[in-house]
Image (cartoon, rainbow, N blue to C red):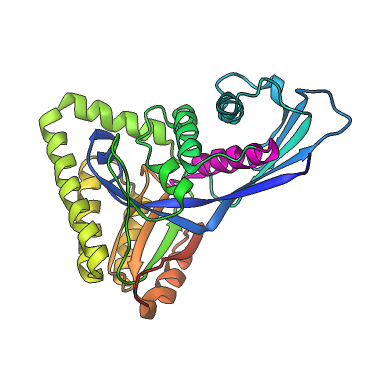
Amino acid sequence: MPSTSSHSPGKAILFGEHAVVYGQPAIAVPVLQLNATTYVLANPIGKPGEVSIEAPDIGLFEMLSALGKENPIKSAINETQKVLKIDHLPACKISIVSTIPIASGLGSGAAITISLIRALSKFLGQELLDSDVNAIAFEVDKYYHGNPSGIDNTVITYEKPIYFIRENPFEIIKPMFPINLVIADTGIKSSTREMVNGVRQRWSADEIKYGGFFTEIGSIVAEAKISIENGDLQKLGSLMCQNQEILHKIEVSHPTLDRLINLAMKSGALGAKLSGAGGGGNMIALTDKDHMEEIISNLKEAGARMVIKTRVEGRKR
């Protein structure tokens, strides 16, 4: 049985985080400059079911049998086996490496899961359909985030910009023009589960107020989709700033995020906001080519831990 590997990209939420959990739309894009990779190598001298796991980025060096039932990696393997109707894995070594920062809102958990599902199914000679990969990844994402919307696993599975409404068919968005983005990591780790739970508590305490915020975000997202498809990047940038204002109101921003967002805007960004659960993690800025390098340089000088540029291709160049 040959060795196999699979790569999955990171992701960034362009609009709609948090509100997407309450049935509002969101827009996400793949970040191809970052990725998680899983390698599966046969162990011809091992016993059936003898599977070792190496994930140095999280300090995991363990046998599969020793992992707890709620470990996301074990869950991904178990769920893949169920779908493929395989009771016992052949002896093998699974190695997982990732360039996606952990707990930063860039989809590290979903990317690892999806690369693992695909590498393992190829290793077993039964490559899964995207829809099956997506369904498995959504179940596994519950171990990471508790009550995920499904947007992370979907955008990473299909590797296309998507317009997403929970429990509805997603739509692939086709931008008229390329969208140039700068993503900066604050270096502050943030738990998506904790941030989502915090918003839920505040929503429970005042459903009318927070429901209004979520509805307003949903309207912004709908406008953003039209702006992307029509190539109106100035409007798109303005909508990003409006989305950020509401994210601030629902208390998911952070002083470091605010500082980097303001700096990006002063450096010529068309729009900027946090991306992901907030409380740290990443900010994302929309820019034209003329200001991109200045924005990157200023964010680095201001102490951003990682700054990358990414591009969503358009129908017209």
Question: Which residue of the protein is positioned furthest toward the bottom in this rendering?
Answer: 290
* On screen, residue 16 above or below 134: below
Give how far across and how far down residue 305 sits, in percent: 51, 57
Q: Is residue 106 one of those drawn in magenta? A: yes
Give how far across and how far down residue 199 sits, in percent: 27, 33
Look at the image and give the residue range highlighted in magenta.
105-125
Q: Quadrant of the N terminus?
A: top right
* On screen, residue 31 above or below 190: below
Give how far across and how far down residue 247 sits, in percent: 25, 46
Decide if residue 178 is on the left or right side of residue 301. left
Q: What predominant SS class does the magenta segment belong to? A: helix
* On screen, residue 301 above or below 211: below
* On screen, residue 160 above or below 51: below
Decide if residue 239 is on the left or right side of residue 302. left
Q: Is residue 55 visible?
A: no
When asked about the image quadrant of residue 173, the answer is bottom left
Of 175 and 65, the residue lying toward us: 175
Q: Which residue: 41% across, 55% down?
A: 160
Of 110 and 157, the residue lying toward us: 157
Of 166 and 130, the residue lying toward us: 130
Question: Which residue of the protein is positioned furthest toward the right in this rendering?
Answer: 45
Q: Which residue: 48% across, 65% down?
A: 300
Q: Quadrant of the C terminus?
A: bottom left
Give how far across and how far down residue 84 sits, in percent: 59, 28
